[in-house]
Each structure stands twice: as C-alpha cells, then as structure tokens.
Image (cartoon, rainbow, N blue to C red):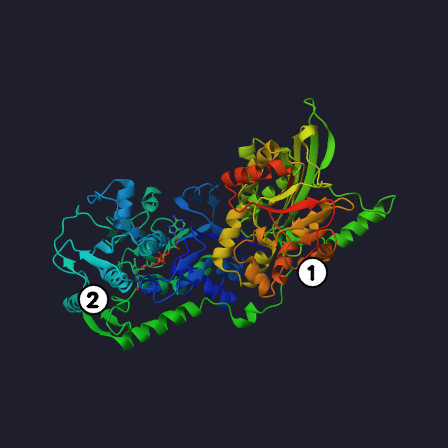
Amino acid sequence: MHAAALLVLAGGGHTHALLLRRWIMRPASRPADLAVLLVNRTSTALYSGMVPGLLAGLYPREACAIDLRDLCRRAGVGFVQAEISGVDPARRELLLQGRPPLRFHTLSLNVGCETLWSVEAATGCGEERPLLPVQPVKPLEPFIAWLEQRLHDPSADPRVRIRGGGAAAVEVALALRARGLRPELLLRREGLQLGSGSAQRAAERLLAQAGIPLRRSVDAQAAADLACTGSRAPAWLAASGLPVQAGTGRVITDSSLVVQGFEHLLASGDCAVIGSDPRPPAGVWAVRAAPLLADNLRRLHTQPPQALRRWRPQRWALQLLGDGGVHPSRLPRALAVYGPWSVGPSRWLWRWKDRIDRRFMQGFAPAPAMAAAAPMACRGCAAKLPAAPLAAALGRLSPTGEAPPAEDAARLDHNEHGELLLQSVDGFPALLDDPWLNARLTTLHACSDLWACGARVQSLQALVTLPQAAPAVQEEWLLQSLAGVRSVLDPLDAALLGGHTLEGRDGAGLGLSLVVNGAVLPQRSWPKGPLAAGQWLLLTRPIGTGVLFAAAMAGSAKPAWLDAALAVMQQSQAPLVEILAAHGCQACTDVTGFGLLGHLAEMLGPGQRVALDPDAIPALPGALELLEQGQSSSLAPANARALVALDGPIALNRAATAAEQQLWIDPQTCGPLLAALPEAAAQAALEAIRAAGFPHAALIGRVFSRAPASRR
Ligand SMILES: Cc1cc2nc3c(=O)[nH]c(=O)nc-3n(C[C@H](O)[C@H](O)[C@H](O)COP(=O)(O)OP(=O)(O)OC[C@H]3O[C@@H](n4cnc5c(N)ncnc54)[C@H](O)[C@@H]3O)c2cc1C
C-alpha cells in the first residue's frame, strides 16, 4: 500500500511506545496507508515504573530502557533523533532544532513533562525561581547523569537537599538513600502531598526508618540540590499557540485525545490533559491512553473517517511506591496507594510491582523467532558490489583485460586557477529511515572520495529515488533528503546544482546517489598510492559500521553502540584535508565498502610491504563484540578475499584475533580517511587531527621496503 499521508509521532513516551508495540503485534490495527515517523531526543525512553528502582541501583539501565530505534524498525516506522522546538499548527509543521521542520498530515504529541522549576528557570517566568542552580529530576537523562557523577565523585557532599513532597520526591529520596547518599526533603507545606492522610503517614514512617529528615514549611527560595517539585509540559507547546491548562502548560484535548480546536493534532500522556476529565500526570494514564490513540488514529485515517472513540479515565490510579531497598534487610518493599487508601510497605507488594514492571518491559523485546530471523542484505555502503565482479566486468571492458587502477575520484580537466577538476559518484539504498540524516550520511560518504584526494568539494548533483507514495509524502521525503545534502554542503560553500528524481518500483524504498565535483591544486592532489617506504599510516576514526548496522537490522545492536556510531559518522571530515595537507600527506584513500584491508591493498604498489599494529586500529563501541558473536555485514564474505594480504604484503606485529580480522574487512559507510604521512610529520598530524575533534584517530602502521615477519 502506498503512503497517502504522513503521521508524525512527537516524543517516544509511553503511549507512543505502546502504540508501536501494538502495530508490531497486530499489523492490521495500523492504518495501512500512512507513512509514520517518530521523533525523540534520545534513542531510548525510560519506563517510568522502573525509574525509582533504576535510581536505587536495583535495575541496570538496559532493563528499564525501551529501544525506540529498534521498536520503530520492527513497526515499520522511521526513527528521527532530534530535539523538538515547537509546532506550527497552521502550516502543519513540527519544528526541530538544527534541521528542517517536518510537515505532517497528522501529529500526535507524547513528549512528557519537565520539572516545574526547570521550566521556570529556563523561561524566567513564574513565581518560583531558584536562587542557586538546582538539578531538576525531569528530563530524566540529565538527572541520572548528575546522580552517577555525584555517586562516582568521592569528594562530593553526600547530603542531597530535595525540594518536593510528592510521590516522586519520596521515591527519589529513598532511592538516593539506598545508594548511600544522605537525602533530606524540603517541603513547602507541613506535610507530604500523597493524596490521603494514611498514605502520608505510611510514607513518613518509611522516610523516618530510612533516616531521611523532612524539613517542613521551607521557603521556596531556600537552597536545594534537586528539584522534584511537580511537573509542567514543555513551554513550546503553549508558545506554539496550542490550548493549554493554566499553570501546568498541558495541552487540552477532548476525550478522544484530539487537541481542542485542532482536528489533526492529538496529544496524550503527561504533556496533555483531557479538558472534561483532568487527571494528574502519571505514567499510568500515558499507558492507558495507548489503545485509544491506536484506535482513533485508525478511525481518523479510514476512508471515510469514522467517529472517534471517547475515553473517561478512571478516577484514581494505583501507585506502588518502592523503598529502594533501604530496609536493614536490604530487601525492597513497596507501599500501595489508591485514592484515599494505602497498604504496606511490604515485600510482597514490591515483588508484585517488580513482576508487573518486568512483564511490561518484556513486551518490548523482539520475539525470539524474529530476533533469529535470517540476515538481510545490508544497506549503506555494504550494498556495494563485491570487488571480484566489479574487477571482472571492468577488466572485460578494458583492451588489456585488466581493470584500470582504482582512484577515489576521476580527473576531468583544469580550471582557470590551474586546479585539477575532480569528479566522483557514490550512493546506496537508504541506511536509515530518517530521510534527512540518511541524506547527510550519504553526502558525507560521497564527499570523502574527494577529501581523500586532498580536494575541496565545490558542487554536487543528486539522484533521489523516492518510494511510491502520495505527492505530499514524496515532497516531504525529497525536501528532507535535499536538506540533509545541504547540511553538508552549506558549511563548505558548495552548491547543490540539481539532479534527478525517480519513483521506485516494486516496493523500492528511499535511495540516494550523488555526483560530487571538486578541485585541487595538482601539487597537493594525493593519489591513492603507491605507498613509499618509511611512511606512517594514519586512520582518522574508528571502523565497524558494517557489522553494527547489520546487527541493527537484526535487532541485536545496543542503542548506545548505534548512537556512538552515528555520532562518528555524522561528523564531517572536510577539516581534515587542510590538516593532512599541512603535514605533507603523500597518499590517501577513504575506507568504504571493501573494508580497511581491501582499501589498504589498493594503496600498495608491487613489492611494497606494510606492518600493521592490531592494537592501534580503533573499533567503534560494540563492533568487536558483535564480530566475536559471529555477526557480520552481508558484504563481509566477499570482502574476506582481502585477508590473503595478511599472508603477503601486510604483516602484523602480533597475532590478530578472528574478530579483529573480520573488523578489518568490515564494509564502512562514512568510513575514515586512511592517509600516508612522512615519518617526521606523522605524530604531529595525529595530534592535530585529534585536537580537531577526532579523538580516536590513530597511527596504525608503517610502510617498509621489505616485509617484516608477520605474526598472523
Ligand atoms: C522520579 C520519578 C518517578 C516516577 N515514578 C513513576 C511510577 O512509578 N509510576 C508512574 O506511573 N509514573 C511515575 N512517574 C511519572 C512518570 O515519569 C510520567 O508520568 C511518565 O513518564 C509520563 O509518560 P509520558 O508518556 O507522558 O512521557 P515520558 O515518559 O516523559 O516520555 C516523553 C518522551 O518525549 C521525549 N521528549 C520530550 N521532549 C522532547 C523534545 N523537545 N524533543 C524530542 N523529544 C522529547 C523524551 O525524551 C521522552 O522520551 C515518575 C516520575 C519521576 C520523576
């Protein structure tokens, strides 16, 4: 089915995560003709029910983190990692920081809340303004980083003054106590704010047993370390002109989750409130809203649209407050609060809560059958034709029967400044479902052919293949792709001259190919080779993207590994050209589809030898671990023929593991530059490159005229 419209899910909160899970489990419940993108600032979302246990050290982070990128992949939804800064409801655009807005047909908001103080501190409005810097508990990620830093700093004061007296403040205080800190609660009023007298008394007993003092009627301006002072929706929602609840800034919806007055906008979770049935923000409402949101999105996008379902949330929600394991027995207990009633604390309540929470998270793990599914053909530069058929076809075309020597870019002519004009072409089926980032990566990858020649990029033409879809969806995909290309070219003062678009057939997805033009003074144009004895080989950044993205397609790459790889890949290597030139670079290539060994072999002249230091070759986080597990890119078997070089011109100064050898034939998208430098300048070049923001650059080997003995 071709996409007729674009649905954007803003925020990877509980409602949207459950919506995606539902679409995975019951594909028929998903509106068939919708293209969907989910936007979130991080690639994982923390499950609120387990956050207090995470803070108390009872759960590792992985146990409580929903892998949004993988969830999107399994649901057939594009994942966009970006910071949302606003909505333009009239133009139907979601505004993103540092990238073009996303134009939607329907938008669903599930962006959660921020701690009240953090909002007021940021906007400077509101009556309460902290005098001293205070760490807000929401958003959670910076708070967790703050806590980790405090726990690992032996000189940090163990005393933590927590402003707040609600359920979250109580749980945070108990969790910090369980981690050996000395929290105290600063209350604005006389007592805790837990809904009922019995719950308050039970919580006060828990705090007293844990040795956590309560300071009552504390002035709002008194110094504190941590703010747990209730929540407020992100300020950009009100600033975008959406109807919001006074005081909390939560978007007001009707009982179908449709934002009042905006029929193409829906909102759920902490950032929203149903005008007719307001409930305090809590994860439970965000969870309960998911089936309704799923149903109403389907109804909205059925032809003709159906009447939307309405919802009246229950009056109270059960809260299970964990004590973090502060009891002398170290066994965690929980206190149950339901409206005016409370029970506990007790160990069985904790065990019950723990079971519920773990079951919730298990629902996001891929089914074993899916996880073990046959490997798919890799995308990005791993979709390159293997070296053998390429060389054979080129050889058959050549009068000599030999494939011509491979260079990174073709030399065209000279311009009026005496510069050599160079041209290169590169492209592949989309590595990512985020069209902007995909285009940025493809462009960086394509430009590196010219950077490897020492050239500056001047202009580019793009061939964009778009999936079959309604014109508005194709327009958005094209705009995002071209803006991604421009994000690389603009800082270089290079022009996007034009190009060509195609509509893919038979379900073909997004694809991008680029012709890149550049210029370089002949005297500083670097050939690929041959290398010369005495040169040092410098690799500008780590390798391993092939196996990491193969694992991502199989759902077995950790989110942090992909975050790290994408951060490296997104960094332009354009500034390195000047640094390499200043240090007398003599030959260079970019490491792409054939892997480090394949491209290094292309640099070698007849009889030349290289000694590599396996310890110096940098790997992206997770790459070696995945290779040790036997995972690899679908291009790796064809690249393995480059391993014969280890028995010939490439010697190792120690035996390499099987995983290391696999890493060196791993196909790279946005791979590093591999440069040959004179011995006298190599160390200085390395230091300059590291100082330019490439901390993992390394000198990985030397060129010899005679082979040192290999330790393979
Ligand atoms: C310490 C603590 C303990 C809690 N314990 C519980 C509990 O036990 N049970 C319970 O029900 N509730 C609990 N809560 C409340 C709970 O965290 C929230 O009610 C719940 O997380 C709200 O879910 P949500 O789906 O609305 O949004 P969230 O879970 O907050 O998710 C919002 C998502 O949107 C993303 N996002 C936000 N702004 C942007 C932006 N500008 N750009 C891009 N992405 C953005 C965030 O990264 C996040 O992934 C607790 C809260 C705290 C602070």
- Residue 1 shows in the view: no
Amino acid type at image mark 1: Pro
Q: Is residue 493 left or right of residue 593?
A: left
Three-letter amino acid code at the position of disc 2: Ala
Labelled disc at residue 460: none
Q: Position of residue 288 (x, y in %)?
A: 35, 65
Asked if 344 appears above or below 191 in the picture, the reply is below
Q: In the drawing, what numbered circle is on residue 637? A: 1
In the displayed orientation, state which residue is furthest to the right.
399
Q: Ligand 1 within 8 A of label 1's CB?
A: no
Residue at disc 1, secondary structure: helix
Residue 270, horizontal then vertical, whole percent: 32, 56
Above-or-below relation of 450 to 16: above
Q: Position of residue 623 (x, y in %)?
A: 56, 57
Residue 339 placement, left or right of 108: left
The image position of residue 281, as x and y in percent, is 28, 58
Quadrant housing the N terminus: bottom right
Q: Mark 2 Cα within 10 Å, few/some/many (few <14, many 20+)?
A: many
- Callout 2 secondary element: loop
Query: Looking at the image, which is closer to me, 646 or 341?
Result: 646
Q: Residues within 10 Å of mark 1 (few under 14, many from 20)?
A: few
- In the picture, the disc for residue 210 is 2
Q: Quadrant of ligand 1?
A: bottom left
**Residue at image point 40% right, 69% down:** 360
Q: Quadrant of the C terminus?
A: bottom right
Say whether residue 103 is visible: yes
**Toward which corner of the image does residue 310 lie, by quadrant?**
bottom left
Question: What residue is rendered at 24% in x and 41% in y?
Answer: 125
Which is nearer the eye, 427 or 653?
653
